[in-house]
Amino acid sequence: MGRLGIIAARGPLPLQLALAARDQGENPYIIRLKGQCERDFSGFETVCLPVGKVGAITNHLRQADCDKLALVGQFKRPSVADISFDKVGLALMGKLMLTGDDTALRIVAAHFAEHGISVVANADYLPDSILPLQFQTARALTPGEVLAAHHACHVLDQLGDMDVGQSVVVQQKRVLAIEGAEGTNEMIDRVASLIDRSQPDTVFVKLAKSGQDISLDIPVFGLDTLSHLQQAGIRAVCLDGGRLMLANPLEEVVAAADKLDMSVFSRASLPEISDD
């Protein structure tokens, strides 16, 4: 019988997945990415390796008898100049250079598959962390927020084929920010100064990109991002029900949103608009 390997980056999900896998009878082997993973994996067999040492990572997984692999957590792409590569990492970097996230992860998954290690979906171990298809917190959306959310979803639908970021902030029909390489929270912090406080109807939308393989890279939302949105003054949050993972338990997200008087809702729960 094989073994689950976990390549752990930032945030709470890597440890959550490791604990869930152990509860399911697995003995996961954890590779903590140096400079990325900040969680304590006491009680697990672990090793800390730099992201550029792909050959070493692969060898450690094979020596630990891993035949499946979960890529978990928020990965911050470092500057190429700051990465120390081994021979395998350097060869892989030639393929990854300047690609989008989805393409890059497909290349990484193909590399491990060549060595008999298949990448598995995070949801296989954390199914209860997937946002329900139909979902909405207590605060009702304003009609203007509904219109803005539909416009934001349309923008992301158009951008998805180009492997562009998963998040956007829209005020009425004005696109204020599209997530780039900086990441979701940094995009929210950046957009805070661009919101016209004299006008209503600002929404944040995060969706899986069209054609995105969510077994490799599923959008994630949690209390940390909710806090950034609250600080930016954004009260309406549209997420991809069924195709987005929560970094914190659903009941905690609901309680926090209700306390902050924020609307968090799935795209499928977004009211329809007329063509009039």
Image: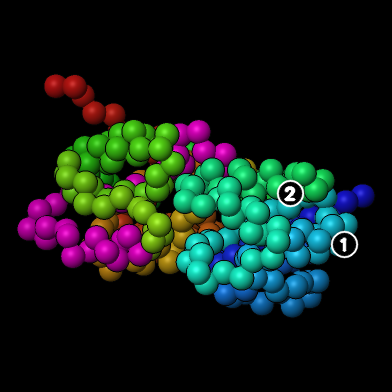
Q: Residue furthest right?
A: 1
Q: Residue furthest left?
A: 198
In the rendered image, residue 204, in percent from the top left (x then y), is placed at 31, 51
**Label 1 is placed on what type of residue?**
Gln
Please, is residue 153 above or below residue 197 in the view? above
**Label 2 is placed on what type of residue?**
Phe
Q: Considering the numbered disc 1 on the image, is that residue within a helix, a strand or a loop?
A: helix
Residue at numbered disc 2: 112
Q: Residue at x 34, y 47 (%)?
A: 205
The reply to whether residue 248 is visible in this rendering is no
Residue at numbered disc 1: 63
Please give the range of residues in magenta. 186-214
Choose top left, top right, bottom left or bottom right for residue 187. bottom left
State how far apart marks 2 and 1 are (Cα). Answer: 14 Å
The tag on residue 122 is none
Q: Are marks 2 and 1 in contact (CB under 8 Å)?
A: no
In the rendered image, residue 129, in percent from the top left (x then y), is placed at 58, 52
In the rendered image, residue 7, in percent from the top left (x then y), is placed at 68, 61
Q: Could you say which is closer to the camera, residue 217 or residue 271?
A: 217
Q: Could you say which is closer to the camera, residue 37 or residue 203?
A: 37
Determine if the magenta segment contains residue 53.
no
Q: Residue at x 79, y 55 (%)?
A: 4
Q: Considering the numbered disc 2 on the image, is that residue within a helix, a strand or a loop?
A: helix
In the rendered image, residue 176, in percent from the top left (x then y), is placed at 21, 51
